[in-house]
Amino acid sequence: MLITFISLTGNVRNFVKSVEMRNLEVDFSNPLIEINEDFIIIVPTYDSEITDIISELIEYKDNIKHLIGFVGSGSLNFDKDYCFNAKDLSNKYDKPLLFTFEFSGTNDDVVKFKKEVEEWNHQN
Ligand SMILES: Cc1cc2nc3c(=O)[nH]c(=O)nc-3n(C[C@H](O)[C@H](O)[C@H](O)COP(=O)(O)O)c2cc1C
């Protein structure tokens, strides 16, 4: 499983560093990258442009065939809009929202996330 992500201010990047798994940072100014293996996308939450950028990545070549699901990073201060980009993408592409965390995540988030991905890897 490959962990792909975008990060505007570094929170998601820090989370990905903490989980120590194979990953690919996608540049939001050039999301057209071909991905030929199962992957998840970790998405920070800002505005609808984020959904558009991630949609470009998903719809590029055959990427959608390998997409497993979404993870959101956001802030609970945004209340009902918490992690709305990852939620919208999950609905749009009918793929699961696997996990959400605030900012760079806590140690507990890192442990839970790693466990979920490792379980998935064992089952597939
Ligand atoms: C301008 C701005 C708007 C944001 N809007 C939302 C939001 O609507 N919902 C949410 O859950 N988090 C929101 N956030 C929080 C970010 O998604 C959160 O800080 C995230 O961890 C950023 O990840 P990054 O540093 O990797 O870009 C917003 C942050 C900023 C600076």
Image (cartoon, rainbow, N blue to C red):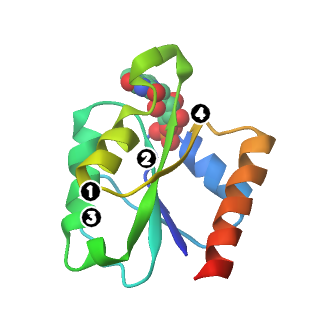
Q: How many angstroms separate mark 1 from mark 2 (CA)?
A: 14 Å
Instruction: Name the N-terminal-most of marks 1 and 2.
Output: 2
Question: Residue type at mark 1?
Answer: Tyr
Question: Residue type at mark 3?
Answer: Ile
Q: How many angstroms separate mark 2 from mark 4 (CA)?
A: 11 Å
Q: Secondary structure at mark 1?
A: helix
Q: Mark 2 touching mark 3, by CB under 8 A?
A: no
Residue 31 % position (x, y): 27, 62
Question: Residue type at mark 2?
Answer: Val
Residue beneath the point at 36% across and 58% down: 95
Of residue 112 and residue 36, the one placed in the foreground of this image is: 112
**Residue annotated with mark 2:** 43
Instruction: Please state, as top left, top right, bottom left or bottom right, where the C terminus lies in the image.
Output: bottom right
Instruction: Name the N-terminal-most of marks 3 and 1.
Output: 3
Is 116 rendered above or below residue 112? below
Instruction: Name the N-terminal-most of marks 3 and 4.
Output: 3
Label for residue 103? 4
Q: Is residue 122 visible?
A: yes
Q: Ligand 1 near label 4 (Cβ, under 8 Å)?
A: yes
**Residue annotated with mark 1:** 93
Q: Mark 2 touching mark 4, by CB under 8 A?
A: no
